Image (cartoon, rainbow, N blue to C red):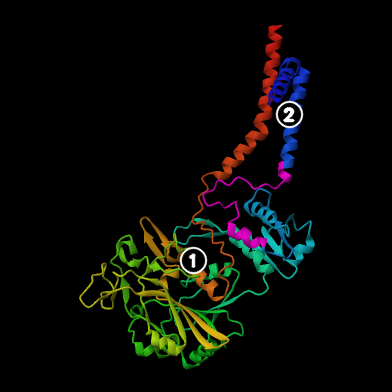
Amino acid sequence: MENIKRSFRKIIRVIKDKWLRQTSLTLLLVAIIVCIFIVLNMIISNLNLNPLDFTQEKIYSLSEDSINEIKKVEQNVTLYYFGYTDSETPVILGNQYHNANEKITVQMVSTAERPDLASEYQITSNDKLVAVASSQRYKVVDSNDMYTYDTTSYQQMDVTEQKLTNAILDVTIVSKPQVYFLTGHNEYGISESEGLYMLSQYIGNEVNDVATLDLLSADMPEKCDVLVIANPEKDFTDVETGKIQTYINNGGKIFWLQDPYINIRNFDVANFKNINSILSQFGISFSKGIVVEQSTDNMIAGLPDLIIPNMTYNEIVKDIYTDGKIIMADAGKINTVSTEELEKLGVTASPFVKTSEKAYYKEKFDMTATTLTKSAEDEEGSYVLGEILTKKINDEKSSTLVAYSNALFASDMALPMGNTATTLISLRNNKDIILNSVAYLTNREDSIRIRKDTGVVTFNTATATQDTIVKTIIFSVPILIIIAGIVITIIRKRKK
């Protein structure tokens, strides 16, 4: 160690006594330092090191979920970047995909350089996009697709990682699950103005094909991995009921979201004969009234109809069980038949979302009232809000129903929260429990869950800060060295 110190002091002495005493040697020293800096910069650039990510939501860094899934990719995948520069987020993430799995490569191209790709992917010179290609298929992700907007706050949300990672999985997956939303009964729809638009986008973003299904005009598709029934307000016809019953008998999977029937004008249980016949196959029915909380730990903002339910650990909630909560708005209850009756139906029931023991059920109240008051006829107790029901069809086949006695909590409906408003699906872990339910029904509960909660992206001037730091290092340091050399030369001449 002492020898190293002596050598270092000797080098400093040589620079001070010889190099800095002569102008030519000073300038040569500056040139050497600048060259070393340039060479180091080139070496570091070629290493493709991950950048420092100062953003609150880590939008420049791949999540662990994403990295773990990318490592499983066994096919060669190329990310062709059209119209991008090296410093932009999609390219930064693209290099991280390559670092995680060498089978994924990144190419910066233009339509002029690769007219063959431009023709194949139908790209023009004005486009800015990423073409993700494997040997079996390709998917184009436009730059506009990498951002979305909170429809209530109108602020930008970054979804670049979700789009790119799922595009890679999309072009390498053998077969994507087919998810159909039932229509024709005033259900919440999946178009941009129909209530479940955001949910449908999230489901599609998890490498599923999403479509609507009208069983009056079409038969049940040959491949339907999940049938989503979201708050029907009219009964099924006999024809539709027969098709759904056949689907169940063939081992079909159903995801049912239902708001309390009291929200339906002139509701009469007799008018829902076919819907109840389907539900009765699994031993359940949905309530007319709503459940109201009295436990302050199970409500939000002191509002007893905004319920924070208790959850029982299972495959659907395992990722959000310890630190996550969901929020249901004006939820009903799920009525389940006795254990003996379930056994006769060949059904196993697993309730996993419940109210507290202090909640009560209410059917009679003023829909326009601003507060809810418990009356003597309102029954108190713990009520089921979410349940998994598995019906054995035969020794080789079973049908599964995941049911929630609330559809609003999965919707785009805006809920005022202080001075802002937030869509219900964006509250707490609402989105995750819904997407986990779909993943459970498609037997993909352990697959990709990159739902990075970017929320409203807060940049905190991170990119500007990084840019300033880099420019300071590149330009200021050499300039300061040159100035120091000039000053030392002038001082030395004056001393002479």
Secondary structure type for disc 1: loop
Contact, CB < 8 Å: mark 2 with mark 1? no
Residue to which mark 1 is pinned: 318
Residue type for callout 1: Lys
Magenta range is 44-71
**What label does residue 241 carry, if any?**
none
Residue 49 part of the magenta segment = yes
Q: Position of residue 310 (x, y in %)?
A: 38, 67
Q: Give me the C-alpha separation between circle 2 and circle 1.
A: 55 Å
Does 219 sit above or below residue 24? below
Query: Which of these two is toward me, 451 or 119?
Result: 451
Residue type for callout 2: Ile
Packing grade of label 1 (10 A; few <14, some 14-19, many >=20) is: some
Query: Which of these two is toward me, 122 or 290?
Result: 290
Secondary structure type for disc 2: helix
Question: Which residue reaches farthest left?
Answer: 376
Does 106 sit above or below residue 23? below
For residue 475, which quarter of the picture?
Answer: top right
Decide whether the magenta segment is chiefly helix, strand or loop: loop
Does 242 sit above or below residue 381? below
Residue 328 seen from this side:
yes
**What label does residue 33 carry, if any?**
2
Query: Which of these two is toward me, 199 or 154?
Result: 199
